[in-house]
Image: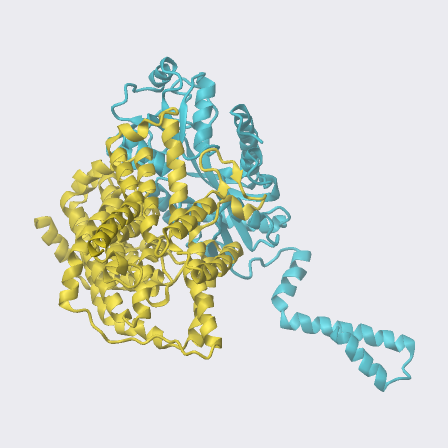
Chain colours: A cyan, B yellow
């Protein structure tokens, strides 16, 4: 615009200028404007130039990490702990922004629709692979490019200490004798822990009375108070009660034993071959983000996840660390999407 | 006792004391800003504590937690802007007192009641935590439903001039609470395919709008009208004789607060309303409530601060967090290698007792910082309305946005502000709406959860003693104003006869 008006004034003064000269003039002025733009904002221009060439100097400014949950939950804590020292590995700081709502779909949708420039990273969790099935949101994991998986916690079948069963086998036998009477607490209908309980009931062919609570903590409280007979939540969520000797965990729904409760067998070891079900948290960027930026983020976040401070934090919070790189994480989400789709349609929750 | 003395000597180190002071001051600031809740304050400070010693780190969080619950009352009284939901009940009489020019007195009462309530709850925590904790476990879905119903029955006493209008706004609150995902089966209700609505309408922006924004809109009238209407602040101090009349209320409310704080899923906001209701029930001067009654400030403030100690009971003794703040504190304790639960007292006795002393000190600090601060806080009332009103609106906007970093919440806040303006104009009380909005989800999900547990039989509400007792109290509370009216009418007609 500026160049245009300038030309007009010039035109006004040198009115007899030849047409070809005029074109040259426009070209020259256009170049000048470009150069000036380059001077005033040379960082972004530099990035463009280098990106076109071999390697970008991304990141040149702080990065935002969307935590699609309220301040204070496990997702928020993981995000904050992971980014606390990330500047070491990334060269820029990462600020955590909480965007709760819609079981995480509000924050994740914003993350998926962010500019694909690598400056908005989203911490996604297991619900991302369930929104479409549940009809909660049209958002799916295919709208993201994965950076990596950070955390995975399996479901752990936990019962009160004085329950009349000590093993998974005895629990299932008891449930078969009392169909529909065993109250299993979960963290909400259609939640991951509900899926866990339904997976058990499907595989073992028993009927439970599923009692949904607002979050796992409430379900565990009800278990300790004797208001429900079992819960299927993560080891971290029952750890305090396990240590206090108020509850016992019969089995964990994963391929290998949990580091937090290594004495507890997996479902397979305990005699029920059920697919692993667990909650997880990983990092993603919008799907059109350039691969070299994803690689940089992958490298930095994987290093940060191995940082001693972070691993100590996770261990003391009872959260399991499970690292998967971009490719593995993508396959993992694909598998989850398929697995949960089947269970949710079996129990009539699929839309 | 030895452990307590050891705790005292552990506390008396300058780092620990400094951290407590910093935490409490931070907490008061966070609490007084609308939209910044106690939970948010504690969660944001949490990462700072990772590198600290266990006692120092936890006490920083305790300071923030306790301070923020108190801080909410400052703006509630001065500006009719409850800084936290826990202070919504305080705004009713607190602001009425400020309008009368008695802000200084109201703040003194709120500071004293907050500190005393907090200390009482900590003392209960120290003395009988393990015994009470097992009682808290008896609370499950049917009891929570009964408690929520009891809470709702309070509407009849919050209603002010017209019980009918109070019930109308209460039901509107309940109706708004049904927006969002169904709490049991996750079916969207009244969401109109809007993603922002799936989580329901957050009651905090509604509260900020109804109380603060509507008040700001109303004061705009005064700015443009020629009529001068600015508050005077009379330097009327609280007299000892006045304080004496409040002691009963403070003690009762502290008991209520400690008890409700202990129950999983019920927190400071509910306790403040319940205490307000009980103060009114026991008062001889029922008419004075809502028009600037000191007991109407003392009750909610001592109750919401005593929730803090109460909430620590199940947290420390059982490892069960009763609400969102204690859930964050649970995380903080675990990061420090302190696993809450029955073993905590045996394994980490000295630390636990140091924390207890720290909690008492934090409440003392509220007194030490709060009382001299009152003069400073009341200065806000000298700010001309033309300056103060835009500032309040900015605070409302920032507060609503910062909750979930969402513009939608800002829209909700402004909509609530406009509605609140007209509600005020036509004498529809705002508090019942807030109460309905807070209690609606709690009541609905616990009702349905109970019925899932009992496989559809409603006898679950009557065969469990705690639930049955609470339901009876709820029915009494709901119909109390009606009975009173009938009794008065009866008496009135009698006296009439005598006269004639």
* Front residue of this view, candidates A230 and A323: A230
Residue B250 in the image: state x and y as whole percent. 19, 56
> Which residue occupies 37% across, 56% down?
B37
Q: Is residue B268 left or right of residue A51?
A: left
Q: Quadrant of residue B420?
A: bottom left
Name the spot of residue A39 as percent of width and height, x first. Answer: 65, 72
Decide which of A92, B323 is in the foreground and name it: B323
Report the number of numbered marks: 0
Q: Quick check: B320 left or right of A149?
A: left
Residue B122: x, y in percent?
19, 51
Whether residue B40 sits left or right of residue A63 in the image: it is left
Name the outermost residue toward the front: B500
Q: Quadrant of the N terminus of chain A?
A: bottom right
Q: Quadrant of residue B242?
A: bottom left
Q: Is A277 situated above or below B431?
A: above
B376 and B446: which one is in front? Answer: B446
Question: Given the current orientation, which residue lies at the most extreme bottom position?
Answer: A13
Q: Is residue B466 left or right of residue A53?
A: left
The quadrant of the image that shows the C terminus of chain A is top right
Residue A260 visible in rendering: no
Locate residue A231, reporting x and y percent: 36, 29
Instruction: Using the rendered image of the protein, determine whether residue A191 is visible from the camera's viewpoint.
Output: yes
Q: Which residue is painted at 46% across and 25% down in the image? A: A198
Is A80 situated above or below A136? below
Q: Residue at x 85, y 84 (%)?
A: A12
């Amino acid at each position: 615009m500026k160049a245009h008006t300038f030309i007009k004034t010039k035109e006004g003064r040198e009115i007899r200028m030849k047409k070809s000269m005029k074109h040259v003039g426009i070209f020259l002025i256009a170049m000048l404007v470009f150069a000036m733009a380059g001077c005033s904002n040379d960082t972004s221009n530099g990035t463009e130039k280098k990106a076109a060439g071999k390697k970008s100097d991304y990141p040149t400014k702080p990065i935002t990490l969307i935590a699609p949950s309220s301040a204070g939950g496990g997702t928020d804590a993981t995000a904050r702990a992971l980014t606390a020292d990330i500047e070491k590995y990334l060269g820029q700081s990462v600020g955590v922004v909480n965007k709760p709502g819609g079981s995480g779909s509000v924050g994740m949708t914003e993350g998926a629709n962010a500019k694909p420039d690598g400056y908005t990273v989203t911490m996604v969790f297991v619900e991302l692979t369930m929104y479409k099935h549940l009809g909660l949101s049209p958002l799916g994991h295919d709208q993201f490019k994965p950076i990596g998986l950070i955390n995975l916690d399996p479901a752990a079948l936990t019962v009160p200490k004085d329950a009349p069963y000590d093993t998974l086998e005895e629990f299932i036998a008891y449930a078969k004798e009392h169909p529909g009477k065993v109250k299993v607490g979960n963290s909400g209908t259609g939640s991951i822990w509900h899926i866990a309980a339904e997976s058990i009931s499907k595989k073992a062919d028993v009927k439970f009375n599923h009692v949904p609570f607002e979050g796992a903590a409430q379900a565990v409280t009800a278990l300790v108070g004797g208001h429900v007979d079992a819960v299927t939540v993560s080891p971290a969520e029952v750890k305090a009660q396990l240590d206090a000797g108020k509850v016992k965990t019969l089995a964990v729904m994963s391929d290998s034993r949990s580091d937090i409760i290594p004495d507890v067998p997996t479902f397979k070891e305990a005699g029920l071959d059920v697919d692993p079900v667990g909650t997880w948290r990983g990092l993603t960027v919008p799907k059109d983000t350039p691969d070299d930026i994803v690689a940089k983020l992958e490298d930095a976040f994987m290093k940060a996840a191995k940082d001693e401070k972070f691993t100590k934090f996770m261990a003391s919070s009872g959260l399991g660390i499970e690292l998967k790189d971009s490719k593995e994480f993508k396959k993992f989400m694909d598998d989850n999407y398929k697995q949960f789709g089947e269970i949710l349609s079996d129990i009539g929750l699929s839309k | 006792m030895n452990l307590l003395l050891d705790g005292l000597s552990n506390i008396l180190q300058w780092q620990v004391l400094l951290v407590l002071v910093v935490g409490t001051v931070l907490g008061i600031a966070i609490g007084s800003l609308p939209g910044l809740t106690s939970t948010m304050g504690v969660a944001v400070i949490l990462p700072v504590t990772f590198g600290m010693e266990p006692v120092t780190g936890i006490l920083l969080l305790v300071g923030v937690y306790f301070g923020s619950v108190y801080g909410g009352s400052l703006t509630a009284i001065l500006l009719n802007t409850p800084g936290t939901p826990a202070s919504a009940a305080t705004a009713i009489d607190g602001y009425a007192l400020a309008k009368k020019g008695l802000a200084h007195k109201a703040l003194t009462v709120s500071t004293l009641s907050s500190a005393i309530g907090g200390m009482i709850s900590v003392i209960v925590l120290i003395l009988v935590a393990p015994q009470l904790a097992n009682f808290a476990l008896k609370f499950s879905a049917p009891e929570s439903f009964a408690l929520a119903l009891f809470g709702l029955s309070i509407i009849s006493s919050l209603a002010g001039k017209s019980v009918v209008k109070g019930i109308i706004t209460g039901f509107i609150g309940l109706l708004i609470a049904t927006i969002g995902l169904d709490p049991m089966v996750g079916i969207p209700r009244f969401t109109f395919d809007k993603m922002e609505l799936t989580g329901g309408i957050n009651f905090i922006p509604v509260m900020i709008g109804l109380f603060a924004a509507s008040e700001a809109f109303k004061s705009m009238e005064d700015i443009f009208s020629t009529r001068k209407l600015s508050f005077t602040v009379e330097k009327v101090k609280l007299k000892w004789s006045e304080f004496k009349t409040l002691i009963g209320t403070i003690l009762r409310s502290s008991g209520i607060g400690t008890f409700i704080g202990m129950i999983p899923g019920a927190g400071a906001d509910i306790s403040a309303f319940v205490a307000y209701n009980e103060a009114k029930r026991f008062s001889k001067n029922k008419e004075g409530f809502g028009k600037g009654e000191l007991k109407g400030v003392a009750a909610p403030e001592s109750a919401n601060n005593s929730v803090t100690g109460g909430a620590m009971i199940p947290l420390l003794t059982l490892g069960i967090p009763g609400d969102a703040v204690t859930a964050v504190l649970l995380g903080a304790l675990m990061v420090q290698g302190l696993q809450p639960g029955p073993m905590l007292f045996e394994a980490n006795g000295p630390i636990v007792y140091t924390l207890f002393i720290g909690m008492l000190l934090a409440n003392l600090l509220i007194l030490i910082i709060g009382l001299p601060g009152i003069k400073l806080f009341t200065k806000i009332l000298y700010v001309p309305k033309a300056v103060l009103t835009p500032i309040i609106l900015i605070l409302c906007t920032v507060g609503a946005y910062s909750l979930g970093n969402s513009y939608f919440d800002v829209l909700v806040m402004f909509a609530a502000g406009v509605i609140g303006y007209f509600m005020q104009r036509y004498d529809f009380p705002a508090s019942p709406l807030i109460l309905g909005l807070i209690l609606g989800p709690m009541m609905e999900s616990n009702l349905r959860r109970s019925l899932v547990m009992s496989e559809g039989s409603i006898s679950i509400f009557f065969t469990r003693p705690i639930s049955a007792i609470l339901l009876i109290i709820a029915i009494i509370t709901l119909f109390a104003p009606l009975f009173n009216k009938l009794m008065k009418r009866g008496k009135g007609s009698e006296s009439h006869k005598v006269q004639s």
